[in-house]
Amino acid sequence: MTYRIILWDNSTHSIHVLQLQKSGVRIITDSRPRDFCRQFFKKLGIFPLMLQYIFSHLLFFVNNKALFQMNYKIHSVNTRYNSDFHWPLINLTTYKNGTYDTGIKVSNYLPTHTKKLSHNVNQFRLALRDFLHFHSFYALEEYF
């Protein structure tokens, strides 16, 4: 499921994959077909599809920081958004729905205390895993 997941962006098939994932979790936990799966995902330590998508994007950005510009490199004013990635000014809808733009948005919405750990990939991964398991988002809209 995680193979090239950051390229899935706005796939219409992601809903079906999430439904299959929920069915599998219900089978594993021996629960009823109408039960909510959020607590089962937490209990089993499994990321729902969108959490895995967010996790993969953030790890990609941390591992490839050199490919992206930070706001503090664009301007010298010390603002609260100084540690965020800089969004290029492009108006193409295809670009705005793409991997690069979505990855910047996901990275910028990350809590500050987790974002500060990005210099150490292992600590960042653990803190990110804890944050995402605690919240267990089903959709990107819940994350934002």
Image (cartoon, rainbow, N blue to C red):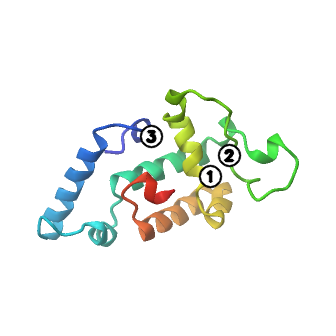
Which numbered marker is on residue 6?
Answer: 3
Label 1 packing within 10 angstroms: few (<14), some (14-19), many (20+) = some
Q: Which residue is mark 2?
A: 85
Left/right placement of residue 4 relative to residue 72 reads: left
Q: Circle 3 — which element?
A: helix
Which numbered marker is on residue 96?
Answer: none
Q: Earlier in the sequence, mark 1 or mark 3?
A: 3
Q: Are marks 1 and 2 in contact (CB under 8 Å)?
A: yes
In this view, 56 is above or below 68? below
Left/right placement of residue 123 relative to residue 135 reads: right
Quadrant housing residue 39? bottom left
Whole-number angstrom distance, CA of label 1 to CA of label 2: 6 Å
Q: Circle 1 — which element?
A: helix
- Can you give x and y, in whole percent of width and height, for residue 81 in the image? 73, 54
Whole-number angstrom distance, CA of label 2 to CA of label 3: 17 Å
Q: Circle 2 — which element?
A: loop
Q: Earlier in the sequence, mark 2 or mark 3?
A: 3
Which residue type carries mark 3?
A: Ile
Quadrant housing residue 74? top right
Q: Which residue is mark 1?
A: 108
- Can you give x and y, in whole percent of width and height, for residue 93 in the image? 52, 29
Which label lies toward us, 2 or 3?
2
Query: What residue is shown at x 81% (from left), y 42% (from top)?
Result: 73
Quarter of the picture holding the N terminus: top left
Whole-number angstrom distance, CA of label 1 to CA of label 3: 16 Å
Query: What residue is shown at x 53% (from left), y 59% (from top)?
Result: 125
Which of 117 and 72 lies nearest the eye of the viewer? 72
Which residue type carries mark 1?
A: Asn
